[in-house]
Amino acid sequence: MKTILASLAHLERVDETLEAAIHIARQHDGHVIGYYPIPGASLIVYASPGGDFPVDDSVKRLYEERLPQVKSKFEDRMRRSGVKYEWREDIRFETKLTKAILEHGREADLIIMGHDAPGSKYASEEVSFIADVVLGAGRPVLVVPPSNGKPFKTDKIAIGWNASRESCRAAFDSLPILEKASDVLLAWVNPEKNPGKAGKLPGAELATALARHGVVVTTKGVSNRSKAAKAIKNLVEEENIDLLVIGAYGHSRLREQILGGVTEYTLKNLPCPVLLSN
């Protein structure tokens, strides 16, 4: 994780985003890019026929007003942390910042994005934005919820595993972080439903592969009649997991990114920081 893009597009999650970026950069002697995109004004489409289309630039003006404050906080935190860093700011024409983050994030080893707490006003709306980034970037994305006073850690990590392409990508994309962890739990929900892939000891082959990188893994089959997403969330809470690693399932339908059930549920009910790959 040598190049880390910290997206500062979520103005209320700047502190959590920076803490995660600093933690990972320190572990890997990484370089943090603080990226602050300013969204464009949105058209007001209910204008009278034949008239000019008015615009709502309130969000744009908010980002412009907060720019000095966020930049000062970023540079101060980075200087005090001792990690290498750079600042980028960008004035965009579009209101949704997906394209902006993709343009700056595709050359990074990791993209970090802030997210609201479950049940908050905009949490559900943010899911589609994060989904577009995760499914379009080709890079792992670390989604960070409100810290609630807890320090960002990656000591105890859980990997949601089912031998799919997406879960395989997530496991190996997170390998540099796994190598630094003290405890890695490989969890397969209801492996008995897919005995051909799971085998006698679900996840044993991946555990062996990770062990060759010095990662000590505990495998666990989780039998649960409820949805797999709820079972994973319960596991995270019961085991006091610091970071969850899962594959992001999804496809494009009519230009809208549609996520699989586990991914969408996890983002809407974020139990801890989550690293997603597709």
Image (cartoon, rainbow, N blue to C red):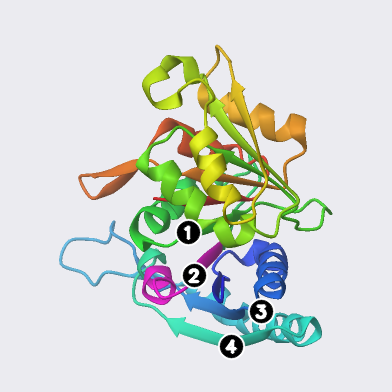
Q: Does dot 3 land on a helix, a strand or a loop?
A: loop
Pair 4/3: label in front: 3
Three-letter amino acid code of the residue under disc 2:
Asp
Earlier in the chain: of badge 4 and badge 1, it is 4
Three-letter amino acid code of the residue under disc 3:
Asp
The residue that mark 2 highlights is 109
The residue that mark 1 highlights is 140
The residue that mark 4 highlights is 86
Earlier in the chain: of badge 3 and badge 1, it is 3
Earlier in the chain: of badge 3 and badge 2, it is 3
Q: CA distance from mark 3 to mark 2?
A: 13 Å
Q: Position of residue 129 (x, y in %)?
A: 43, 54
Q: Does dot 2 land on a helix, a strand or a loop?
A: loop
Q: Position of residue 172 (x, y in %)?
A: 49, 53
The residue that mark 3 highlights is 29
Question: What residue lies at 34% left-to-right and 70% top-to-bottom?
Answer: 94
Q: Residues within 10 Å of mark 2 (few under 14, many from 20)?
A: some
Taking the magenta stretch, the answer to whether it contains residue 103 is yes
Q: Nearer the viewer, residue 58 or 246?
A: 246
- Decide: is 212 above or below 250: below
Q: Does dot 1 land on a helix, a strand or a loop?
A: loop
Q: Which residues are magenta?
A: 100-112
Earlier in the chain: of badge 4 and badge 3, it is 3
Q: CA distance from mark 2 to mark 4?
A: 15 Å
Q: Nearer the viewer, residue 154 or 215?
A: 215
